[in-house]
Amino acid sequence: MAQKESRASETSSLFNPIPAEFAAAGKKRFEDFVNSQSELFGQIQDANRQWLDRVRTEANLTSEFATKLTAARSIPDAMTACQDWTARRFELMAEDGRHLLADTQKFIETGARLLSNGWLTKGGLST
């Protein structure tokens, strides 16, 4: 009976081209890849939300500026509205620069972590 079981295991190993340890390693690498992609996707979603909020802020600022400009009764009132709008635009541009730098840094850190996990050096993406 034991002879039949050993022959069955020998036969199954002959027909199985991928040993169990290779399959386990491949599964782990695939899970790592999926986790990295999920993390990157989450970061991209966060960045998109921030930029969408920024577009809404810009639209509100433009609407307020148009309202103030049409309500202006004199040139000094119109100039004040323009100065306020310009000052706020420069503040928003500075915020945009900070967000862009922070987003880029997050993406680079995630990419570096992906590379340091061996995706390129251990055969994940290269030959």
Image (cartoon, grey):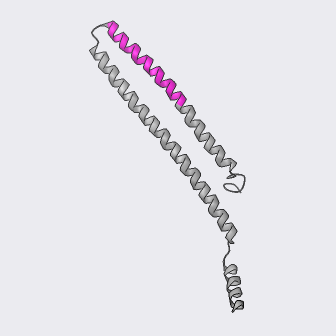
User: Residue 85: image x %, image y %?
Assistant: 40, 18
User: As drawn, is 119 to the left or to the right of 49?
Assistant: right
Q: Above or below — where is 42 with respect to 5?
A: above
- Taking depth in this image into account, of 2 and 105 the one nearest to the observer is 2
Q: Above or below — where is 31 with respect to 93?
A: below
The quadrant in which the C terminus is found is bottom right
User: Does the magenta-highlighted stretch encompass residue 82?
Assistant: yes
User: Does the magenta-highlighted stretch encompass residue 56?
Assistant: no
User: Residue 48: image x %, image y %?
Assistant: 47, 39
Question: Residue at point 37% right, 10% down?
Answer: 79
Residue at the limit of the structure toward the bottom, as seen here: 1
**Number of marks present in the image shown:** 0
- Taking depth in this image into account, of 86 and 43 the one nearest to the observer is 43
User: As drawn, is 45 to the left or to the right of 3?
Assistant: left
User: As drawn, is 5 to the left or to the right of 81?
Assistant: right
The quadrant in which the N terminus is found is bottom right
User: Residue 52: image x %, image y %?
Assistant: 42, 36
User: As drawn, is 127 to the left or to the right of 74?
Assistant: right
Question: Residue at point 55% right, 48% down?
Answer: 39
Q: Above or below — where is 38 with respect to 97?
A: below
Question: Residue at point 29% right, 12% down?
Answer: 72
Q: Which is the main secondary structure of the residues drawn in magenta?
A: helix
- Taking depth in this image into account, of 7 and 79 the one nearest to the observer is 7
User: Residue 120: image x %, image y %?
Assistant: 69, 51
In magenta, the rendered stretch is 75-98
For residue 53, what is the image quadrant? top left
